[in-house]
Image (cartoon, grey):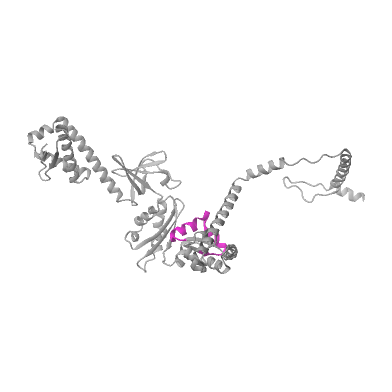
Amino acid sequence: MDGKEVLRIVDAIQRDKSIDKEIVFGGIEQAILSAARRHFGEDHELSVDIDRDTGEPTVFCDNEKLAKDILGEILGRVAAQTAKQVMIQKIREAERDTVFDEYMDMQYQSVSGTVSRVEGGAVLINLGKIEGILPRGEQIPGESFRVGDRVRAVVLDVRKAGSRVKVILSRTHPDMVRRLFELEIPEVADRIIDVRSLAREAGYRSKVAVSCIDSSIDCVGACVGMRGARIKNIVDELAGERIDIVRWNDSLQVLVPNSLQPAEVEDVILCPMLGRVIVLVRDDQLPLAIGRKGQNVRLASKLVGWDIEVMTQTELDEQLDKTVEAFSSIPGVSEELAESLVSQGFFSYYDLSVIEPDQLAELGGLTAEQCEQIVEVADRESERVEAEEEAMRVAQKNPAAESDESKSESAVEEPEPAVSENEAVEEAAVDVNDTENAAVADETTVPEELPVEEPVNVDNSAEESTEKQE
């Protein structure tokens, strides 16, 4: 093998495959070493070194340098073929590692490509060097793709699969919205406007909290754009997903009402011990604050990182009275301690069961043993309440089963006692009299309402003739 030929091969592979020269030199050395072992066997100590400047290979057998003619004999036709296969394998592994490292650096970054084929719901996207896989679960609900469509997604995961690399893509990940903001809004790309927090339910709604280092710039208005042009491009890319842009604030008293927009908030009560926020709203704002199927408050909770509980003032007062009464019934919990727990946001037995003993001791001045007993009772009561709620849910889901049970119970009822012959005759006589009286009553009684199924025309001629005879 000529040194110039080795250098030419290394340059060509480095240029075409974007593989580092040192990796290619290492692959060629491994190929020559494999051919030498095939020639000499496993009993000899062999090593190969290629000059990086001249490309000349040198083979050592038992620390002795082999002559060129022996080297040519080693790299005969069969051995050269083996060396070629080893070299190709090494180059493929190096190429795989290069692609793997490249896309690992692009994790959660945006990529685009064209749909090459659709298989069983999964979409294969040609990214240039490699095909990415967009699984059904990572597609926005309701969207479909055809071969040739241009698709934008984020790199969710990169895996090695033998000699190949699998690139898993996603269009439902929250970072998809973040990357679209960077593409469509220059201020976000330049870090003038910062996306501080993001919550998303793909295909339905997203909430994005933004802030700006320049007080003269309206960060919300800049994201929306002139007549909504910027945000419209993002919504179109996300198949019509609704996006709420809110202004970030380090104070939860300000951030929580912003996150619940468009609902109007009256008051915000922080419960730091539980990481919970109680939000008070008017009765007419309650459905708007909660949102459809709880979506608005759920996204707001993800956005601020605290559990948000929305209620009216009346509901809060009722909850306070009910909880104080329930906690006071626990042995060792005084009314003052119950009120202190409620003021910290503990509204249920479950909340009390997860409290830290030192926190409970600090609130009520209790011993460690008393705290353990209170937590144990709260844990039992929490399980009981949970079992009752589960039974109620099962009963609501299966009303037909309950009706069948009631029918079967009525069918097993005891039969009525036998009636004597005289009693039967008397009852028959009473039934006849009742029937005659009912018939007379039906003839003389006028119904209060007519059936509404069909219009009824009342003929008044009979009434007029009766009045003339009188």
Residue 397 in the image: x percent, y percent? 59, 47
Q: Is residue 3 left or right of residue 138?
A: left
Residue at 53% in and 66% down:
341
Q: Is residue 146 left or right of residue 401?
A: left
Residue 152 lies, in percent from the top left, at: 36, 48
Q: Looking at the image, can residue 269 be seen?
A: no
Q: How many marks?
A: 0
- Residue at 11% across, 32% down: 73
Q: Determine the main secondary structure of the stretch shown in magenta.
A: helix
Quadrant location, the N terminus? top left
Magenta run includes residue 428: no
Viewer-closest of 373 and 187: 373
The residue depicted at 92 percent of the width and 49 percent of the height is: 469
Asked if one can make out residue 255 in the rendered structure from this viewpoint, the answer is yes
Q: Which residues are magenta?
A: 278-306
Please give left or right for residue 431 compared with residue 281 in the image.
right
Queried whether the magenta region covers residue 301, the answer comes back as: yes
Residue 369, horizontal then vertical, whole percent: 51, 63
Q: Residue furthest top?
A: 78
Q: Name above or below for residue 357 compared with residue 65.
A: below
Position of residue 280 measured from the top left corner of the image (x, y, whole percent): 53, 65
Give the left or right position of residue 445, taking residue 167 as reference: right
Indicate whether 377 appears above or below 447.
below
Please tell me whether residue 248 is drawn above or below residue 114 in the rendered image. Answer: below
